Image (cartoon, rainbow, N blue to C red):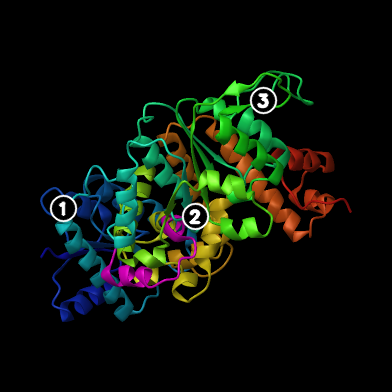
């Protein structure tokens, strides 16, 4: 094993660390400045590097940058003054494993160095992640049943109803059904019926003719026409308004529909795959869902298991999501320790796979070091608080997850609690943008901007109990502006004072 390098212009700090590490039978090598340490890298490398941040000549941040350029996997611990928050943040941005705040407890310092040492040794033996991963991951028996069903349906055009809790991956299964069907080379169009305002949903589905309503200045093709010869995925079908259910039933029955304001029937050659997290049988009994439409959709039913039913898949999924989020941000993937994997496997995750993915995105941005321990997970998570629900709600609202729990950022960074640094949610926003850009999406600025505005206005309205004038004042925008945006974004729950 290689020695631990200590770089500090303070001889007493070097002496204390040398003696403490010697008692642990750990070899050390010391330097009084960053310049000598950088020169030593020409002929040798340490197992772990511990460096002060403020030294004459090159600083610890300069040394960190030089080391990471040559040896990106080498753990570097930065020593800094307790009150120097800017330096701590700069350390993490530069890729530091962690930092020691002066004055530090020597036992805690040795424990941190030991942890970095374990990380360094583990880094050397880690195999590269596979270049390609399956479109849907899962080894649990319940998921194997889903895979078998997809295989049996591979040459069929039959209508499929996918059921399962929110976040179980219903759209992924719908895409897999399309990909392995005879329509694979044709469009796959997805529409979340619960996300479209009721008065716009009909036009979204069936399109409209020019002049059909105010603002309809040109003919517009709906999702059925966009999916011609391909597959139309209707998510959250249980939330579809009752009158639109009748129109959907007609399309499924005779394969024709009318655009809004139109008088000529349009033929639809579309395979419909629907999904819901609701109990459609109960909604039929309650008079909220048409029984005849239910039977039209329920030709083949696929039930997706919750994450509780496939706990053995959590390690596989977590590794996949950590690699995926790291690739999107252009950083090295984090790894979970055995204890952290056991912790995650024992958690209640009501948001299922989507919730686990959000947590892995959070870990990629916020957790120190390459190997993630239990103590690196969000404190609310390990203390039994509903942080995962916060992450899921934030994602569903289009808000970066860290923004929903601002206190989590300084806690996870090991910084004293206080006003949250923006790096957390900005990092997750960057992750979301990177994912959209990698997927080839267009108008990313507009989409994320609308989601950001929607999240802000909804939060302000909730805070003001729906009073939009009060919400506008608190947001710093005009009354007319918030009224216009509420209409444009389809936000409910606003009222005049």
Q: CA distance from mark 2 to mark 1?
A: 35 Å
Q: Which residue is mark 2?
A: 424
Q: Are marks 1 and 3 in contact (CB under 8 Å)?
A: no
Give the side of residue 356 with respect to residue 216, left or right: left
Along the line of sight, the residue nearer the viewer: 30 or 146: 146
Which mark is first along the chain, 1 or 2?
Answer: 1
Magenta residues (range)? 336-358
Task: Indicate whether 196 appears above or below 31.
Answer: above
Mark closer to the observer (2, 1):
2
Point out the tag, 2 or 3, that comes first from the N-terminus: 3
Between 424 and 135, the one nearer to me in the picture: 135
- Left or right: 7 in relation to 365: left
Judging from the image, what secondary structure is the residue with disc 1 in?
Answer: helix
Q: Which residue is mark 3?
A: 259
Disc 1 designates what residue?
Answer: 40
The residue at 21%/55% (across/down) is 37
User: Could you tell me how far apart the alpha carbons at marks 1 and 3 are, in whole angstroms?
Assistant: 74 Å
Q: Quadrant of the C terminus?
A: bottom right
Classed neighbour count for the residue bearing mark 1: other residues with Cα under 10 Å, few (<14), some (14–19), many (≥20): few
- Magenta includes 339? yes
Q: Is residue 332 visible?
A: no
Q: Is residue 317 magenta?
A: no
Tell me where residue 480 appears, x and y as whole percent: 83, 39
Rendering coords of residue 104 (x, y %) = 37, 75
Q: Residue furthest right?
A: 497
Does label 1 or label 3 sit earlier along the sequence? 1
Q: Is residue 457 above or below residue 156?
A: below
Quarter of the rendering containing residue 124:
bottom left
Q: Secondary structure at mark 2?
A: helix
> Residue at position x 57%, y 30% from top?
254
């Amino acid at each position: 094993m290689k020695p631990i390098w200590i770089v500090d212009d303070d001889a007493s700090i070097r002496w204390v660390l040398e003696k403490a590490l010697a008692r642990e039978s750990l070899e050390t090598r010391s330097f009084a400045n960053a310049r000598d340490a950088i020169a030593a890298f020409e002929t040798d490398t340490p197992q772990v590097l511990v460096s002060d941040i403020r030294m004459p000549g090159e600083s610890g941040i300069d040394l960190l940058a030089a080391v990471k350029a040559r040896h990106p996997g080498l753990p570097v611990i930065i020593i800094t003054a307790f009150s120097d928050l800017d330096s701590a943040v700069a350390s993490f941005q530069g890729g530091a494993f962690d930092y020691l705040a002066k004055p530090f407890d020597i036992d805690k310092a040795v424990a941190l160095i030991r942890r970095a040492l374990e990380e360094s040794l583990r880094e050397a033996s880690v195999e590269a992640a596979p270049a390609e991963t399956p479109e849907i991951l899962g080894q649990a028996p319940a998921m194997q049943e889903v895979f078998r069903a997809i295989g049996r349906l591979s040459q069929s055009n039959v209508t499929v109803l996918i059921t399962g809790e929110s976040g179980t991956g219903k759209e992924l299964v719908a895409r897999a059904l399309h990909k392995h069907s005879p329509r694979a080379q044709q469009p796959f169009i997805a529409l979340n019926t619960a996300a479209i305002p009721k008065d716009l949903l009909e036009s979204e589905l069936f399109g409209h003719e020019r002049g059909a309503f105010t603002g309809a200045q040109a003919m517009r093709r709906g999702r059925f026409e966009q999916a011609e010869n391909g597959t139309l995925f209707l998510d959250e079908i249980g939330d579809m308004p009752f009158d639109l259910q009748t129109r959907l039933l007609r399309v499924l029955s005779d394969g024709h529909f009318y655009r809004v304001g139109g008088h000529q029937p349009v033929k639809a050659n579309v395979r419909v795959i629907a999904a819901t997290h609701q109990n459609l049988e109960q909604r039929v009994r309650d008079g909220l869902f048409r029984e005849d439409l239910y039977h039209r959709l329920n030709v083949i039913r696929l039930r997706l298991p919750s994450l509780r039913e496939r706990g053995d898949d959590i390690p596989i999924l977590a590794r996949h999501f950590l690699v995926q989020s790291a690739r999107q941000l252009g950083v090295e993937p984090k790894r979970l320790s055995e204890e952290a994997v056991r912790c995650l496997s024992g958690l209640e995750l009501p948001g299922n796979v989507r919730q686990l993915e959000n947590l892995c995105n959070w870990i990629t941005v916020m957790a120190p070091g390459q190997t993630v321990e239990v103590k690196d997970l969000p404190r609310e998570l390990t203390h039994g608080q509903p942080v995962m629900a916060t992450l899921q709600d934030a994602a569903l609202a289009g808000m970066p997850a860290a923004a929903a729990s601002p206190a989590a950022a300084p806690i996870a960074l090991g910084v004293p609690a206080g006003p949250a640094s923006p790096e957390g949610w900005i990092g997750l926003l960057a992750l979301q943008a990177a994912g959209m850009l990698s997927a080839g999406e267009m108008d990313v600025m507009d989409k994320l901007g609308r989601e950001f505005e929607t999240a802000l206005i909804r939060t302000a309205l909730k805070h003001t109990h729906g009073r939009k004038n009060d919400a506008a004042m608190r947001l710093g925008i005009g009354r007319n502006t918030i009224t216009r945006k509420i209409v444009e974004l389809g936000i409910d729950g606003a009222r005049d004072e």
